[in-house]
Image (cartoon, rainbow, N blue to C red):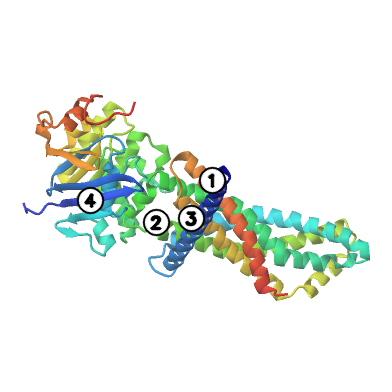
Amino acid sequence: MILLTHIQFFLASIGRSTLELLASIGRVAIFAGVTVGHIVRPPFYAKELGQQLLRIGYFSLPVVGLTALFTGGALALQIFAGGSRFNAESVVPQIVAIGITRELGPVLGGLMVAGRVASSIAAEIGTMRVTEQIDALTTLSTNPMKYLVVPRVVAATIALPVLVLIGDIIGIMGGYLVGVARLDFNSATYLQNTADFLQSGDVTSGLIKAAVFGFILSLMGCYNGYNSGRGAQGVGQATTNAVVAASVLILASNYLLTELLFPA
Amino acid sequence: MSDIPKISLRGVHKSFGSKHVLAGVDLDIPAGESMVIIGGSGTGKSVLLKCILGIMKPDAGEILIDGMPAGKDRDAFLARFGMLFQGGALFDSLPVWRNVAFRLLHEGKSKAEAREVAIEKLRRVGLKAEVADLFPAELSGGMQKRVGLARAIAAKPEIIFFDEPTTGLDPIMSGVINELIREIVVEMGATAMTITHDMSSVRAIADKVAMIHDGKVQWTGPIGAIETSGDPYMDQFLHGRAEGPIEAVR
């Protein structure tokens, strides 16, 4: 009898968690749908969009640049060490280029920006929720989705591909610097090999991924902030949830996008 | 004066899960009157304001403004209201003058014109023009309330809501804010609805008082009648007694 109760309790808890998960997915999907609906309908807040482009795009440049630089350098060292096992050290420029543009540039760039931006969006909008600033916007005839959410989501979706493109260049530079300074590659040959090997599809696929990651991370920041619980604890929880959800979704969608863009 | 009340609430219900916050609120507020709604914390006073503004949707009941339900044009509907929020709810990212002129700027008024109106409204609430370029975080609690008040009246609304206008202020500043609210409401001829549990606010601001408890209006009457209402809820609240029909959580 007791065993049966335990099993029932266990199954009920699984059921509850599953229902809660599905409800959350539904809520996020509705939030995303409403956001996209507002993107295409006026009024548009160009000034807010400009400010967000500056905050999300321009001010993330150092983070993305440094991440790309060190990743490119480390990648060159690893490929050289791995390649030397079967006398293929010469592939360093090509593999660094493809690794950075297709995968590491967008994914690491996305994750770094998620840490920096999704958290700050969630904290800002969460605080606005807790201090009734969102209600105040509504009473002043301003739709908070249009005024707060749309500029952030559009700015991140535009800024991420630009950031990743710059990150790609810096990442390849990182590989080049290590290749030439540490691994005795000829400078001109390294650059020539990179340029000859790289195809436009390698870069554009990374930029498409970056746009999707930008949308995801800003949406997660906005969603969690907008639905923040009460008090400092509520805002703290919203910030954590935003970063965790954005990071996991970036990694999951990266796999799906890779399947779509480069089917086996 | 027309017989149709400015704000009319009929059987307004609102629940959160199993908690019935509003359980059939009926209330009329005539045009140009200042109604103060009192009641303990968590009795649904703020929810009532949010239902009238459409920030929350009531589960049942009717809310009429000038005898009409809120139309589809939300912007036009909300343009008739001004609201002073409990904590001020000033936008941290904007300087004071942009906070005050927020609606005007979004209605397309020029920057210079909107700034001029903002400074005039700031003067009206007793703040100097220099405050206009400060950010809300640089102001004291009392100054933030004044800025909130200036924002609430900037677009000359017909109806003004005050949500706990004196919470967090010292008694002297509370008196100043109460006086300002009274003056401004009379001067503008606006209909005012204030929610508070501060009896000094009630005495300074109200023409009429409504007492909310258990999600319903328990008593309503003119300010002069609160001492002699004979209503056990009103009496307990007025004299701050622990014993009575309102259960105190100890």
Pointer 1 chain: A
What residue is disc 2 on? Answer: A144
| Residue sitting nearer the eye, A42 or B65 | B65
What residue is disc 3 on? Answer: A223
**Count of numbered marks:** 4
Task: Say if residue A49 shows up in the picture.
Answer: no
Query: In the rendered structure, which amino acid carries the disc numbered 2?
Result: Pro
**Label 4: which secondary element:** strand
Based on the displayed image, in which of its 4 quarters is residue A56 positioned? bottom right
Pointer 3 local density, CA inside 10 Å: few below 14, some 14–19, many at least 20: many
The numbered mark, 1 or 2, whose residue comes first in the sequence reads 1
Pointer 2 chain: A
What residue is disc 1 on? Answer: A5
In 3D space, how far apart are the residues under numbered discs 3 and 4 (Cα atoms)?
Answer: 30 Å
Using the rendered image, report if marks 1 and 2 lie on a common chain: yes
Using the rendered image, report if marks 3 and 2 lie on a common chain: yes
Asked if marks 4 and 2 touch (Cβ < 8 Å), the reply is no
Pointer 4 chain: B
| Residue sitting nearer the eye, B42 or A94 | B42
- Tell us which disc is closer to us: 4 or 2: 4
What residue is disc 4 on? Answer: B12
The residue positioned 54% from the left and 49% from the top of the image is A8
Residue B146 lies, in percent from the top left, at 30, 39
Residue A51 lies, in percent from the top left, at 49, 56
The residue positioned 38% from the left and 37% from the top of the image is B139
Residue A135 lies, in percent from the top left, at 35, 50
